[in-house]
Structure formats: structure tokens, C-alpha cells
């Protein structure tokens, strides 16, 4: 992987908090602390639309399964729904009584879940935007929420150091996943629905069974808080984003670190794998998004990746960029 293979999206005036791909992988949406979200041409790195309306930082962004709409979550306590084609706002949902941290569409497109500092997950009807149910069991603010591939369950990650699995229809808590020794920052369901990945301030990537919540694997290597996690489309690999300024790719079957993506000059807030499996997008405090070509099997890049664009930042570089 050569440095000039990486597409860099610039033009933000604040840290970029999140990035998300639509199903076709041709565009990319990003959420920023400048109170906007943006839509980009992912192939050429050109800006297409700015989604303007939020009055506080935008924390998360998600595409509807058909890529017609984009949902955003904000510190202004709202979720907003936008036309992906025009960037115009379609709906404003007064979602929570405190900052909204996460937003996730159900794979069938009929529901949207939000998570917030008010310690709840809320489930919304995606046609009427009626509140269907509120899930409350976490003992502290909730950082992230995701749906199972079959739309029947939800998983939420919280500052109370737990991940909780919910019955999406009944709203009942099914499992409480423990193990992290610090805040849980993000959670992601594997494409086949059998595993759940979570990351924490304790610098660990954990893999749990989605059936019973049992911890199957714990992986370490980052030098600071891990902020986000995602799965490759085939479920063989996971990618993590960290405040140490890098993203890393892991072989979760073998429990091995494969690649270190080091090029940002600030902490990495978000990581998203493209639907075709060939690219990983990272969003950073350095006000940029980078799109990395990782091939459909990242193991093919191991030998040549570490010495060039895919290397870890040295301790001296981290100090120079103000990273811990």
C-alpha cells in the first residue's frame, strides 16, 4: 500500500466523528463537530452535499438500506433524516432528553435505533417516526447501538462498562456482556449474526458470542483508547480506530493483528469497511477522512503494508502531533 493509494477527504473545520458507507460503496457520509454531516464521492474524494441543520456536533451517521436516506445523531438531542440524493432534511425527530450518540437502521429498513446520554436506547418507526419503545437498563450514558443482521436484536455499548443485547421487538434485555475494565465505546454485530465485537477505553477489542454473551477473544495492541470497531463484509476480519492515531485490522479467527494504518495526525474516531471489502474509511480528529485500499483479504498486504502508509506512528510522531 503506497501513500498515494490513500484517498484523503479534506475541507472540514473540526474533528470528524464518524463515517459510513451506503450499500453500493460509491459514496461516503461523514459526521463532524462542525455541526454538519457531508456526503462524498468515495472514488474521487469530491464533496457532494452538506447536511446542515443541527445546532451542536454531529456524533453519528447511518445510511438506510436502500441508500435513499441518511440519519444523523447529534448533541442537540435530535435525530435528523436527510435525502441522500439532494442533502435536504426530510424529518426532524426530538429523539432524547440528552445528547444522541448513536444511530442505526435495521437491515430491513423499517426501524431506526438511537442511543443517548440519557441512558436509553429508543426504537423508531422509519415511516412515521413514531417512538415504538424505550430500552432502559444501562447505568450510565450509552455510546453506541447496532442491529443484528436479521433485525431481531439490538446491542448497545455504554460507559457502565457493559454491552447489552436486547430483543428488538419486545424490548427485553437478553444478555449483559461484561469484561471491559473501562468505558465501552462501540459495538458491532458480525455479518453472519453469530458474534459481537466491542471496544473500550481499556484498549481491548473483545469478541463475544451473540447467542449467550460469552467472551470468545480479547485482543490488545493499541496504545490508547479504542474508539470504534467494524467487521469486514465476510466476517473474517475486524477493524478498530484508536486515539493513538491509528486504525488496525485484525484476523478475528486467528486472534492476530494484520495491519496498522498510520497516517492521521490526530486520534482516529471512526472506522468503516466498504461493502465490497476492498476499502476501509477512517475519520479523525485531524479533520480528515482517509480511504485505505486493503484488498478483500488484508493478509495479502502484510509484508508490504507496515513499512509504508500502513505503519504505526512512532512515539516521537505521537508527541509531535499532541497524541498520548
Image: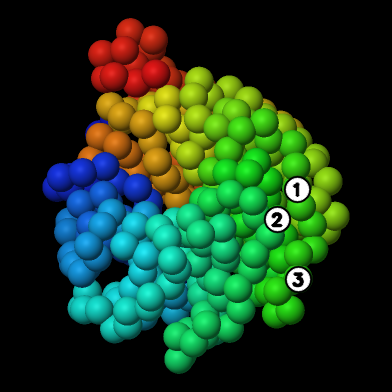
- Mark 1 surroundings: few (<14), some (14-19) or many (≥20) residues within 10 A: many
- Depth check: 209 or 172 in front? 172
Q: Quadrant of residue 317?
A: top left
- Side of 23 where 300 appears, left or right: right
Q: Are marks 1 and 2 in contact (CB under 8 Å)?
A: yes
Determine which of the numbered discs, if any, sits on residue 309 in the image.
none
Q: Residue at x 38, y 71 (%)?
A: 79
Q: Quadrant of residue 4?
A: top left
Q: Residue at x 29, y 83 (%)?
A: 90
Q: Are marks 3 and 2 in contact (CB under 8 Å)?
A: no
Q: Are marks 3 and 1 in contact (CB under 8 Å)?
A: no
Q: Earlier in the sequence, mark 3 or mark 2?
A: 2
Cα separation between marks 3 and 2: 10 Å
Q: Residue at x 56, y 75 (%)?
A: 123
In this view, the residue farthest toward the top is 316
The N terminus - image quarter: top left
Determine which of the numbered discs, if any, sits on residue 164 in the image.
2
Q: Secondary structure at mark 2?
A: strand
Q: Secondary structure at mark 3?
A: loop
- Side of 212 where 45 appears, left or right: left
Q: Earlier in the sequence, mark 3 or mark 1?
A: 3
Determine which of the numbered discs, if any, sits on residue 172 in the image.
3
Cα separation between marks 1 and 2: 6 Å
Q: Residue at x 19, y 67 (%)?
A: 52
Amino acid at each position: 500500500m503506497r501513500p498515494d493509494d490513500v484517498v484523503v477527504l479534506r475541507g472540514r473545520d473540526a474533528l470528524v466523528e464518524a463515517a459510513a458507507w451506503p450499500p453500493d460503496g460509491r459514496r461516503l457520509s461523514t459526521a463532524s463537530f462542525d455541526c454538519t454531516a457531508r456526503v462524498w464521492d468515495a472514488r474521487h474524494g469530491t464533496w457532494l452535499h452538506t447536511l446542515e441543520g443541527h445546532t451542536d456536533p454531529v456524533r453519528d451517521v447511518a445510511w438506510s438500506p436502500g441508500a435513499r436516506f441518511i440519519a444523523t445523531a447529534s448533541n442537540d438531542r435530535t435525530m435528523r433524516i436527510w435525502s441522500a440524493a439532494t442533502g435536504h432534511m426530510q424529518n426532524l425527530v426530538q429523539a432524547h432528553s440528552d445528547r444522541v450518540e448513536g444511530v442505526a437502521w435495521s437491515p430491513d429498513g423499517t426501524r431506526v435505533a438511537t442511543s443517548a446520554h440519557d441512558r436509553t436506547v429508543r426504537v423508531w418507526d422509519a415511516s412515521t417516526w413514531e417512538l415504538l419503545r424505550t430500552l432502559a437498563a444501562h447505568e450510565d450514558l450509552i455510546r453506541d447501538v447496532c442491529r443484528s443482521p436479521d433485525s431481531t436484536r439490538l446491542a448497545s455499548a455504554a460507559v457502565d462498562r457493559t454491552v447489552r443485547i436486547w430483543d428488538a421487538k419486545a424490548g427485553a434485555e437478553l444478555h449483559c456482556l461484561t469484561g471491559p475494565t473501562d468505558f465501552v465505546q462501540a459495538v458491532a454485530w458480525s455479518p453472519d449474526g453469530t458474534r459481537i465485537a466491542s471496544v473500550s477505553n481499556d484498549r481491548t477489542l473483545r469478541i463475544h458470542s451473540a447467542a449467550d454473551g460469552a467472551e470468545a477473544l480479547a485482543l490488545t495492541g493499541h496504545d490508547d483508547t479504542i474508539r470504534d470497531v467494524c467487521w469486514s463484509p465476510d466476517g473474517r476480519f475486524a477493524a478498530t480506530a484508536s486515539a493513538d492515531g491509528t486504525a488496525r485490522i485484525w484476523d478475528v479467527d486467528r486472534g492476530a493483528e494484520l495491519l496498522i494504518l498510520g497516517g492521521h495526525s490526530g486520534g482516529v474516531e471512526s472506522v468503516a469497511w466498504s461493502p465490497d471489502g476492498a476499502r476501509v474509511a477512517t475519520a479523525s480528529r485531524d479533520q480528515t477522512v482517509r480511504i485505505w485500499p486493503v484488498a478483500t483479504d488484508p493478509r495479502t498486504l502484510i509484508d508490504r503494508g507496515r513499512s509504508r502508509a500502513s505503519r504505526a506512528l512512532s512515539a516521537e510522531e505521537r508527541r509531535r502531533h499532541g497524541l498520548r
